[in-house]
């Protein structure tokens, strides 16, 4: 069983930045693809970004995240990050850290493990 704990959410003004963090346990981190999903009120969960098992490995971003968000990982710390900049009110959502053995499953929106989520609110 994989445990994922997110932190770093909060309230930020439009145009601001925020960095989300996630710590993982229960599975060799360097063998685990990681990702961030989000769910806004009244909407379905959607993939924000994903990163394969190696540091600096292949990544996948949703179109709205390209150029504004950066996903990264530190395998020595079992940590995943999402640096978000130029935030918009439409980025308001609960952000979930996710994990799966396969990067392809993350891209397909079907990761096996999910964190509890952290709220990000962007005010206009």
Image (cartoon, helix red, strand yellow):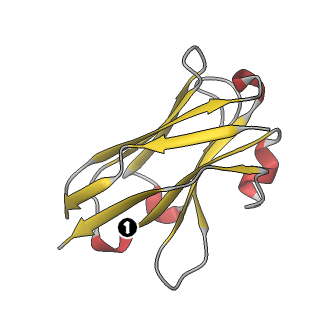
Closer to us: 11 or 66? 11
Answer yes or no: is residue 60 visible: no
Closer to us: 114 or 13? 114
Report x, y in % for residue 59. 62, 41
Report crowding for label 1: few under 14, some 14 to 19, many 20 or more residues within 10 A (C-alpha): many
Side of 65 where 73 appears, left or right: right
**Circle 1 is placed at which residue position?**
91
Report x, y in % for residue 74. 54, 22
Q: Quadrant of residue 119?
A: bottom left
Side of 115 where 92 appears, left or right: left
Report x, y in % for residue 7. 42, 42
Q: Secondary structure at mark 1?
A: helix
Side of 36 where 85 appears, left or right: left
Quarter of the image with the C terminus is bottom left
Query: Residue at 61% across / 49% down in the picture?
Result: 115
Query: Residue at 39% across / 51% down in the picture?
Result: 67
């Amino acid at each position: 069983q994989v445990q994922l704990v997110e932190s770093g959410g909060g309230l930020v003004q439009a145009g601001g930045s925020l960095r989300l963090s996630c710590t993982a346990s229960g599975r060799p981190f360097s063998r685990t693809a990681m990702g961030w999903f989000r769910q806004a009120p009244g909407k379905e969960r959607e993939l924000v970004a994903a990163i394969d098992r190696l540091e600096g490995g292949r990544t996948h971003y949703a179109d709205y995240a390209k150029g504004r968000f950066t996903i990264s990982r530190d395998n020595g710390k079992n940590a995943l990050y999402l640096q978000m900049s130029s935030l918009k009110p439409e980025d308001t959502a609960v952000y979930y850290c996710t994990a799966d053995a396969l990067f392809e499953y993350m891209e397909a929106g079907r990761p096996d493990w999910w964190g509890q989520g952290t709220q990000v609110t962007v005010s206009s």
